Image (cartoon, rainbow, N blue to C red):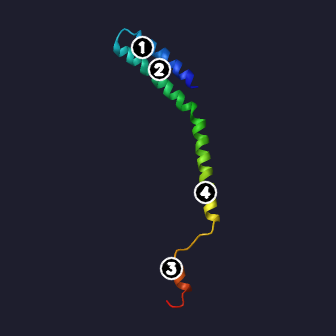
Amino acid sequence: MYIVAIGWLFVTSLMALTETSVVAGVATLLFYGLLPLALLLYLMGTPQRRRNRRAREAREARAAATESDSPSIRSVDSPSDSRDDPDR
């Protein structure tokens, strides 16, 4: 996919170089090259971003499940310890 993007930028940069003025060259490069290419790469990258998000959410869910399954260790200063202490 990136080889097509590189080729498109090469072609549009050559088109921009052949324009009669600098403003026309910049406009050609921007509106015919960079903006459509950015949109294309964003849209083509959507499935990968979706897979990455789902994988991250699955990892977080597994970590939360593992964390809730493991026994918790209460601290010494925990208020629940005071109920078990007859001296208090």
Residue in view at x 34 percent, y 16 percent:
23
Which tag is nearer the camera, tag 1 or tag 4? 4
| Disc 2 packing (10 Å; few <14; some 14–19; many ≥20) | many
In the drawing, what numbered circle is on residue 63?
Answer: 4
* Upstream in sequence: badge 3 or badge 2: 2
Which tag is nearer the camera, tag 2 or tag 4? 4
Question: Is 58 above or below relative to 51?
Answer: below
Tell me the kind of residue under disc 1: Ala
Question: Is 88 above or below relative to 70?
Answer: below
In the drawing, what numbered circle is on residue 33?
Answer: 2
In the drawing, what numbered circle is on residue 34?
Answer: none
Say if mark 2 contacts mark 4, CB within 8 Å: no
Give the x, y percent position of residue 64: 60, 59
Question: Is 18 above or below relative to 59?
Answer: above
* Upstream in sequence: badge 2 or badge 4: 2
Say if mark 3 contacts mark 1, CB within 8 Å: no
Residue in view at x 49 percent, y 14 percent:
11
In the drawing, what numbered circle is on residue 79?
Answer: 3
Spatial CA distance of label 2 from label 1 is 9 Å
Callout 3: helix, strand or loop?
Answer: helix
Quadrant of res 68: bottom right
Tell me the kind of residue under disc 4: Ala
Callout 1: helix, strand or loop?
Answer: helix
Question: Is 26 above or below relative to 65?
Answer: above
Is 30 displayed left or right of 87 in the figure?
A: left
Spatial CA distance of label 3 from label 4 is 27 Å
Which tag is nearer the camera, tag 3 or tag 2? 3
Quadrant of res 50: top right
* Upstream in sequence: badge 1 or badge 4: 1
| Viewer-nearest residue: 18 or 39 | 18
Give the x, y percent position of residue 43: 55, 31
